[in-house]
Image (cartoon, grey):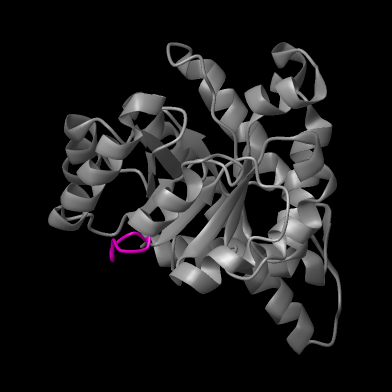
Amino acid sequence: MVFRRSQLFVPGNNEHMIRKAALELRPDSVIIDLEDAVPIDGKENARKLISELLPQLDWGNKELCVRVNAPNTPWFYGDIDTVMKIDNVRCIVIPKAEFDLGFIYKATGKEIEPLIETARGLLNIEEVIRSEGVTAVSYGIVDFALSVGGVLQAYESNQVLRTMVVSAARAYGVDPIDRVYFDIKNIEGFRRECVEAKSLGFVGKQVIHPSQIPIANEVFSPSKEEIEWARRVVEAYEKAVREGHGAISLDGQLVDHVHYRLAKRILDFANQLG
């Protein structure tokens, strides 16, 4: 099973950072970035670098992804041609996704993670997420604010956008991953946003600095308290079912089949993490 509690962006033109992400850091997922992190005159060199370097490195259990340039740019098809030839790249991240992306999966055989970053992308989010090969989705607030003519700060706390992304993802069985948090010095602010994202249903957080990785991994893993609660719910509910009851009271709270399913999911996740 692929975990995406932390998804680290790494510049596709920085050999040192790529090596560090593979060999030293512990994110669940790494996104090698050929888009925003690479200037226009460096696109070709970045492609050559990742073509040679990524296959040489031991990525362990990390999911290796590459963010290509957007489909409406002149670099998109060159990026796709490069990435499809790198065997250990599992997933292609598509920025500014606005339409069915199944053709990319069919051409490359690699999983797809769209980024919702435009007004049209948000309006077409179901079509985007239902594309063949899509296994995760995230969103970007800077490009989205630009797309709608809004102010960045208004979308840093916009719950409507987050709710639409997480709801569409859950409706079609793909992983919702929360956006990048830009203030890398504000560790407590990052933690608060992780906790909030988890409470909304996101499975992880996209990160841009090594200091954010352990926090995301911790927050998006079941806590000891959650595991203990889940065990008690499962034991109590299964006992009640054997006795012919469909709902019970546990610590003064109603527990029914929905709570049981939630508890089972927590325990399954904890067991998979080991």
**The N terminus lies in which quarter of the figure?**
bottom left
Spot occupied by residue 80 in the image (x, y as percentages of width and height)? 43, 55
Q: Horizontally, is 253 left or right of 200 in the view?
A: right
- View extreme (left): residue: 56
Q: Which region shows up in magenta? A: 84-89
Q: Quadrant of residue 238?
A: bottom right
Spot occupied by residue 189 in the image (x, y as percentages of width and height)? 55, 17
Give the residue displayed 80% in from the left and 67% down from the top. 258
Give the residue displayed 52% in from the left and 19% down from the top. 182
**The C terminus lies in which quarter of the figure?**
bottom left
Question: Between residues 43 and 202, which one lies in front from this camera angle?
Answer: 43
In this view of the protein, can residue 85 be seen by the observer?
yes
In this view of the protein, can residue 221 be seen by the observer?
no
Q: Horizontally, is 40 left or right of 69 in the view?
A: left
- Does 192 appear above or below 177? above
Give the residue displayed 72% in from the left and 48% down from the top. 98
- View extreme (front): residue: 74
Q: Horizontally, is 256 left or right of 270 in the view?
A: right
Give the residue displayed 70% in from the left and 59% down from the top. 129
Q: How many numbered marks, from 0 up?
A: 0
Is 103 magenta? The answer is no
Question: Between residues 36 and 208, which one lies in front from this camera angle?
Answer: 36
Prevailing secondary structure of the magenta residues: loop
Question: Between residues 11 and 212, which one lies in front from this camera angle?
Answer: 11
- Does 43 appear above or below 53? above
Q: Horizontally, is 29 left or right of 93 in the view?
A: left
Spot occupied by residue 102 in the image (x, y as percentages of width and height)? 62, 67
Q: Quadrant of residue 257?
A: bottom right
- Does 125 appear above or below 148? below
Spot occupied by residue 14 in the image (x, y as percentages of width and height)? 24, 30
